[in-house]
Image (cartoon, rainbow, N blue to C red):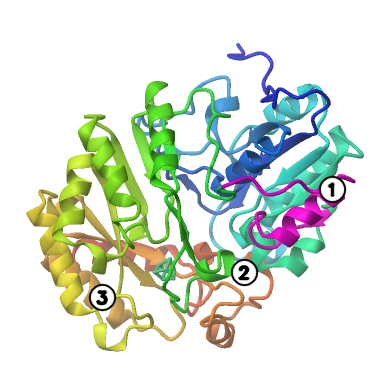
Amino acid sequence: MRLKQPLITWKSSGKANSLRILGVNPWIYDFAAYNVWSRPAGLLTCLDMFARSGCDTALIDLMDQDLSDLKWTDHKKTGKGPYPKVALPKPFVLKDVPRQFSRYGLPRQRAVEAFSELDPKPDLILVTSLMTYWYAGIISVIGMIREIMPGVKVCLGGIYATLCTDHARGLDADMVVSGPLERPDNWLRVWELMGKKSPPLPEHAGMIPDTSYYQEPDFSILMCSRGCPFKCPYCASSMLYPGFRQSDPDIVIAHIKAEYERGTRDFCFYDDALLVNPENLLYPVLNFIIEHNYNLRLHAPNALHIKYLTPRICTLLKQAGLSTIRLGLETTDFKNRRDAKLLFEEWRDGIFNLLQAGFVRRDIVVYVLTGLPGQTEEEVEATLRECLKMGIRPELNYYSPIPGTPLFKKAVEVSGYALDEPLFQNNSIWPCVQGGFSWETQKCWKKKIRNPQ
Ligand code: SF4
């Protein structure tokens, strides 16, 4: 039985003859995927910009249960959980990878219904993209759009479109946008595609992810900043968003208030550098949550910078309800770090400050990077040992070679795969590990996480 009729409704600008902009978050095609409070944040900021420029807007998110008849099986109350999936044949070039390939997200038939029932039809469809190696999901969704709504213009943006722009131009979109939509040239081009003159960008363009399209959300997201002041050689943050920009605390607080009033209690930070310059944003936001006794569960699955875990930040995070803590450790080989984001003393003090603030060791999870070009197993094992000795939980994070990053050249040199093909950038295949993914080695790593001796 269907929960809602119609499946998708337009959010009206209140103006007559408004242009209609539909945002689409495509399926994931991969060997593995898990929903860790996932939302297409960039796409939601684009819809906000169009809505505040006088357009009617709507969203079809194929990676959310909102369009499903039922809550997805095992979907946890906090909003995290597995996606439904359908097994698919592997792409031919990945035929030797010993893992099951799947499409994750909303059943195809349900997606067909959502697009078919959309009334009236949009003037422009914005398709977003995330991981570079998920482009099969984009091909599939654009194909569906072409069949159901022939003639409607399609604009492709997001992470894959920014990092692999030339490759993305080979897909069937009418336009590919590289970089943020609020970049003036991108904003101009998208309006030109609709045959219109672009209005001025709305205030705070790019900083407001509009989550109101989700009718029964288990969680919401918080975007306090864009970009990151660091430039780690394995990371694409500075290519996706040059510079570092913080939001206005009043905007973030208004968002929390609105979501809280409709029952949302789980909030996930979407920042790359949440703890930087906390007096501008994080302090007022956390103080608001604390003073209003909101009793929230806050989640920070994007790695927090350990060097900024001061006693004050840790205390406020604890009081405001931070319950998912993920730290960007990468390695404990401090002398030979590939990045400049952490010293040994900062690591030691950061953990100490978290514990002093009342967090317990078993709740602290640190990301350990593995599968980097030229990295030795000994380095990873030493890091695991160090974490376990301290009573905190390491989590292995497999390296994904990202085109345009400083480490990519080295990755190309060591990898057995032709890494200019985005499918080979998938960290599930361990592209820079000799021999690639193997279940046996993975079992070994799992054992080492429990006991690295
Ligand atoms: S600190 Fe984190 S987000 Fe910033 S560049 Fe390094 S890895 Fe990327």
Q: Amino acid at mark 2?
A: Phe
Q: Residue at label 3?
A: 381
**Looking at the image, do the residues carrying marks 3 and 1 touch, with CB atoms under 8 Å apart?**
no
Q: Is mark 2 within 8 Å of ligand 1?
A: no
Quarter placement of the N terminus: top right
Q: Secondary structure at mark 3?
A: helix
- Seen in the picture, residue 150 relative to 337 is either above or below; the reply is above
Residue 166 lies within the magenta run: no
Local packing at callout 2 (Cα closer than 10 Å; few below 14, some 14-19, many 20+) is: many
Q: Secondary structure at mark 1?
A: loop
Label ID, residue 197: 1
Q: Residue at x 46, y 70 (%)?
A: 399
Label 2, label 1: how many angstroms apart (C-alpha)?
40 Å
User: Which is in the foreground here, disc 3 or disc 1?
Assistant: 1
Q: Secondary structure at mark 2?
A: helix
Label 3, label 1: how many angstroms apart (C-alpha)?
57 Å
Q: Amino acid at mark 1?
A: Lys
Q: Which residues are magenta?
A: 175-203
Q: Position of residue 171 (x, y in %)?
A: 81, 57
Q: Residue at label 2?
A: 424
- Seen in the picture, residue 200 relative to 277 is either above or below; the reply is above
For the residue pair 167 and 18, the one nearer the viewer reads as 18
Label 2, label 3: how many angstroms apart (C-alpha)?
26 Å
Of the two numbered discs 2 and 3 on the same chain, state the one appearing first in sequence.
Answer: 3
Q: Residue at x 66, y 33 (%)?
A: 60
Of the two numbered discs 3 and 1 on the same chain, state the one appearing first in sequence.
Answer: 1
Q: Residue at x 41, y 73 (%)?
A: 230
Specify whether 44 is left or right of 237.
right
Quadrant of the image occupied by residue 310: bottom left
Quadrant of the image occupied by residue 280: bottom left
